[in-house]
Amino acid sequence: MKKLFSLIAMLLVALSVISSGFAQTPVTSDCLRRPFAIMEVEVEGVNVVSNGKLVTNVVNIERGDNLNVRVELEAFCPVDDVKIKTWIGGYEYDDIEDSTSLFDVKTNVTYVKNLVLEIPNDLDLDD
């Protein structure tokens, strides 16, 4: 039976800079404050973030599903060693997570990364 599983995009998709070693090009203070932005996030084809803003936080899933997450990142200045991680916390045995390998971003380039969360069969959807 399908159940609604509430996913809050800010908790589902977190972007972390592992080592913010900026490239050897000069950067502005604006660039240091916000070197990139998550512009779009799709979970199972449902747009949860559009133009950098949360648009919905509910996605239908079933136990045992593979949850496809598409993240679109726009870079405003060059950054080395960026990693995108998506997870669902609160599962009693561990977090359900996936992440990209480290990659470098270049100014004015949009990057698209696809991640997959494997939803366990014993996940209690009531909690």
Image (cartoon, rainbow, N blue to C red):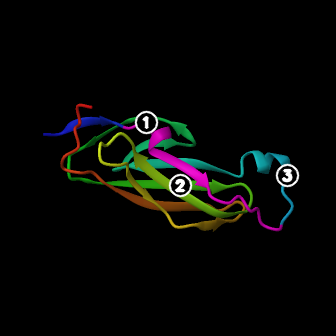
Residue to which mark 2 is pinned: 72
Secondary structure at numbered mark 2:
strand
Secondary structure at numbered mark 3:
loop
The answer to whether 70 appears left or right of 91 in the picture is right
Where residue 99 appears, as percent x and y from the top left, is 46, 59
Precedes in sequence: disc 3 or disc 1: 1
Residue to which mark 1 is pinned: 8
> Considering only vertical position in the picture, is 20 above or below 49?
below
| Residue range highlighted in magenta | 7-24
Which residue is rendered at x = 57% and y = 42% of the image?
52
Tag nearer the camera, 2 or 3:
3
Q: Nearer the viewer, residue 75 or 125?
A: 125
Residue to which mark 3 is pinned: 28
Where residue 114 appears, as percent x and y from the top left, is 43, 61
Tag nearer the camera, 2 or 1:
1
Amino acid on which the number 2 mark rests in the picture: Glu
Secondary structure at numbered mark 1:
loop
